[in-house]
Image (cartoon, grey):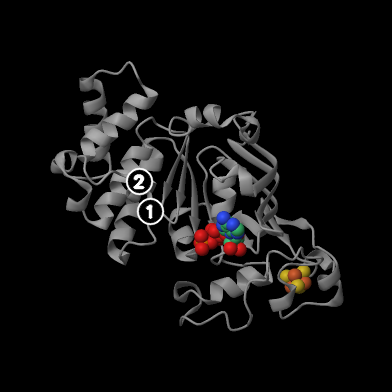
Amino acid sequence: MALLDLKHINITYHVGPKNVYAVQDANLAIEPQDAVGIVGESGSGKSTLAMGILQLLPDRVTTIEGEAIFEGVDLLKLSREELNKRRWTDISVVFQKSMNALSPVHRIGKQMEDVYRIHRPQADKNEAQSRVIEMLKVVNLPERVYRSFPHELSGGMMQRVSIALSLLFNPKLLVLDEATTALDVVTQGQILKEIMALQDQFNLTRIMITHDVSVVASTCNKIAVMYAGRMLEMGYVKDVLVKPKHPYTQGLLKSFPSFTGAKEELRGIPGALPDLSVYPTGCVFAPRCPYATEKCRGELPAMQSVGECWHAACHMLGGEG
Ligand code: ATP
Ligand code: SF4
C-alpha cells in the first residue's frame, strides 16, 4: 500500500477576479521507502503541490480539491491542528529557506530543544538535549553548533540544522523542497549523499522537489515530471531519464549536460510556460511542442501506461495521435 497516495489534486489560487490553476489533476502514489523526485521548471506547481497537501497555503486565497491519503487518512480532511500534530512526527518538510525560520538571537541547541518539547511536552531537559545532540551528529555537524547562533554558521551548516530538525521525531515521510538549491555544488553534493544515507538509516520515504534533473538522477529511484501544473510523465528514474517518452521530458533532459552532452537552452521547445490563469483545453505543452497537432490543441491527453510503473500523458504515445 502506498504511504502517500495523491488522487486528483487540483489547487487554484484566487488572485482578485482571476484564478491561477497551479496544480491540475495530480495523481501520484508514493510507496514506503521510495525516493520520488518531482521535477519541473520554475512555476510548474511543484511547491504548490507540496504545500497544498500539507495545508500550508492560505485558505483565503486557495482552493484545494482531491485526496492526499497518508496511511489511510486523507490529509486534506484533517483540521490544521490535527495536521500540525502529524507534521514533524509523521511528515517533515525542509524548504530552501527553512533556516530563515530560526531566531537569530537564540542558540541553535535551545531552539531545537524548544521544537522537541512542543511535540514531547513531558520531555525533561536531558532527554531533549540528548536527542538534539544526537541529531546534530547524524547530519555531521560539529558539537559547537549546539551552542552557536545562526549567524555563526555557513549556509550548508544551516541547511544541515534544518535537516536535523526535520528528523527529530523520526518522521516516515521527508519532503525536501529545493532544500539544497542555494548551496555551492560541493556542499550540495555532500548533503545529498548524507540525505541518502539517512534514508536507509531511518527507513525514510522521501520526496525531493527540484528544478534540477541531476539531483533526481543522483538521489531518487522514481521521478514525476511536472509542467504548467500537470504531471506529464512519471516512472522509475532508470527508465524516464534514460528513454523519456514525453516530448517535454525529452526537452528538459536536453538542458542538462550530464545527460546529453553540452548544456543548451531548451532549444527544441522555444517559448515559456503558459499563463496558468487560462484554463487549458488541450495538452498544456502544445504551444511549445514540436509535434503538436490539432488534436493536441483541442483534447487533453490522458495519462497512460507506457511501461512497468511508467506513465505519460501524450497523444503521440500508444498510437493515439
Ligand atoms: P519554483 O521552483 O519557482 O518555486 P514551482 O514549480 O514550485 O516553482 P509554484 O511556486 O508552485 O511553482 O508556482 C506555481 C504557479 O502558481 C506559478 O504560476 C506561480 O506564479 C503561481 N503562484 C504561486 N504562489 C501563488 C500565490 N500565492 N498567488 C497566486 N499565484 C501563485
Ligand atoms: Fe506534444 Fe501533443 Fe504530446 Fe502534448 S499531446 S506533448 S502537444 S505531441
**Disc ID at residue 143:** none
Relative to 166, residue 265 above or below: below
- Rendered location of residue 276, percent (x, y): 68, 64
Quadrant in which the N terminus is drawn: top right
According to the image, label 2 marks what residue?
101
Q: Are marks 2 and 1 in contact (CB under 8 Å)?
A: yes
Q: Residue at x 63, y 71 (%)?
A: 273
> Is any part of residue 239 visible from this angle?
no
Towards the viewer: 36 or 122: 122
Foreground label between 2 and 1? 2
Q: Is residue 296 left or right of residue 89?
A: right
- List x then y, in percent, for residue 251: 60, 75
The crowd level at tag 1 (other Cα within 10 Å; few <14, some 14-19, many 20+) is some
Residue at x 50%, y 82% (from the top left corner): 264
Amino acid residing under circle 2: Ala
Q: Amino acid at mark 1?
A: Lys
